[in-house]
Every structure is written in structure tokens, then in C-alpha cells.
Amino acid sequence: MINQVFNEDCLDGMKRIPDKSVDVVVTDPPYKVISGGKGIMNRDGQMLEKNDGKIFTHNDIKLEQWIPEVYRVMKDGTHFYTMTNTLNLENTLKVCRETGFGLHNLLMWRKNNQVLNRWYMKSCEYILFLYKKPAKKINTVGTSQVLEFKNPTNKIHPTEKPTALMKVLIENSSNENDTILDPFMGSGTTAIACIDTKRKYIGFEVDKGYYDIIQKRIADTMAARADLLEGL
């Protein structure tokens, strides 16, 4: 399964991963959102009036289903990063703690743009930084809790994350040749970050359209790396 992304539900795919075999889990799971509502205009500009809480077709997986599987496949003394928002922060942390994870920190990805909101404009996203006991330090202990990277432009996925952001998380919690798991690959940014940092990856993406995008990104990245090495 190493260095592969599978077009399947992670609940099925993770069953094939042996216990305590993964070094780090980094993921941005589907969850209810505040954005995505009906736009209205008022004197302050466009705001959100209504929200259905859903961006993706496959948005119904429950925390209680996939988080225990993540815990099972992780080695002892390893790190788990999961992105979330204000609506899901409390429940995600509750399920993680009940599963056995400890909380190291609440990180923030500060973006260069803002999202319309009736209760202050949103310019950051949260990352729960958890661990499977025993606790261990990150590789670069001077890293800030607030990670500032530009939001990708011309996105190929609605919630695409900067590769540079994923690389910071991966490099701080693993070493070269370690295995990184992302149960919700989306556009494949975690896989690209692993290739760039010489880590192994395992990923799952249930949406066939995004799965095809991931395969092309990986192929293009590997081809670019080969061209670079050839030119040295």
C-alpha cells in the first residue's frame, strides 16, 4: 500500500493497514461548514443568510467511525494532525480524547484572504495537533503555533491546502522514509508534500473526480523530479 492513493472509502481502505504501522497522520476531513450558504446584500456588503453545512457529496462520515481506525494504525509516540473549524472543534477533540489521543496544541493556519461571515471575517483555519502516547517533541521546536501561508489560487479542490503548510507538519513530526497517512486526500497535497520531503504515503479519496486529479498531480510531480535529477 505504500506510496499509493486508493479510490475508495477510507473506512474500507484502512482495514488493510496493519496495527501500529503509520508514523504520522495528516488530514483535512469533510465536516460541516459555515460557508456555502445563500448570499444576500446589505449595506455592509454580501453576507451569508442560509447554510446547508455541506460542500462535498461524500460529507456524511462520522468522527466516531474513522478516528478510532486512525488510532489503531498509528505507532505509539506519533503525531496526528486533523483540520477543523469552530463548528466541529469541540466534538472532534471530544472524540479524539475518548479514543485515547492527547492534545499537544491547537495550531492555526493564517491565510492571506478572508471568508464572509456574520460573526467576524474568517482568516484562519484550525489544526488539532494530537498525539498517541507517549508524547514526543516536534523536530523544529521553534515553529510558531500560527502558520502563515498563502491560500492556493486557481484551486483544483474547494478546500485545497498549501503544500508548504503540509510540509511543515510532516517534517516536524517524522523523518525521511517514514510513512504518512491521509484518509481524505482531496487534491493530493499530502502526497505531494511527502514526495517533496522524501516520505512514504498512503491515501484514500472516495471521489473519482478528485482521485483522477491526485493521480495526475503525482505523475507530474514525479516527472518534474526526474527531470531535475537528470539535469544535475
Image: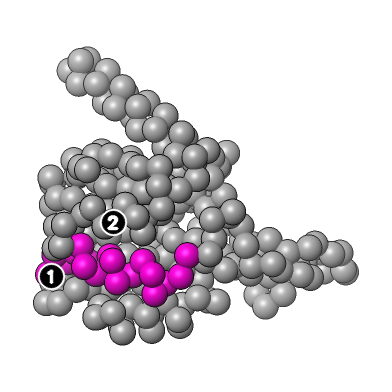
> Which quarter of the figure is the C terminus placed in?
top left
Q: Quadrant of residue 22?
A: bottom left
Q: Is residue 173 visible?
A: no
Taking 220 as reference, is 232 left or right? Answer: left
Q: Nearer the viewer, residue 52 or 162?
A: 52
Q: Residue at x 84, y 64 (%)?
A: 40
Q: Residue at x 22, y 15 (%)?
A: 231
Label tally = 2
Question: Callout 1: helix, strand or loop?
Answer: strand
Q: Is residue 62 inside the magenta stretch?
A: yes
> Which quarter of the figure is the N terminus placed in?
top left
Image location of residue 2, percent across then percent down: 20, 42
Q: Nearer the viewer, residue 184 or 158?
A: 184
**According to the image, label 1 marks what residue?**
77
Q: Quadrant of residue 4?
A: top left
Label 2 and label 1: CA atoms lie apart by 20 Å
Q: Is residue 221 above or below residue 16?
A: above
Q: Residues within 10 Å of mark 1 (few under 14, many from 20)?
A: some
Image location of residue 42, percent across then percent down: 87, 68
Residue flagged by tag 2: what amino acid is it? Met
**According to the image, label 2 marks what residue?**
14
Q: Is residue 53 inside the magenta stretch?
A: no
Taking 11 as reference, is 143 left or right? Answer: left
Residue flagged by tag 1: what amino acid is it? Gly
Q: Residue at x 57, y 68 (%)?
A: 32
Q: Residues within 10 Å of mark 2 (few under 14, many from 20)?
A: many
Q: Residue at x 42, y 37 (%)?
A: 214
Question: Callout 2: helix, strand or loop?
Answer: helix
Q: Is residue 205 visible?
A: yes
Q: Earlier in the sequence, mark 2 or mark 1?
A: 2
Over which residues does the magenta segment extend? 61-80
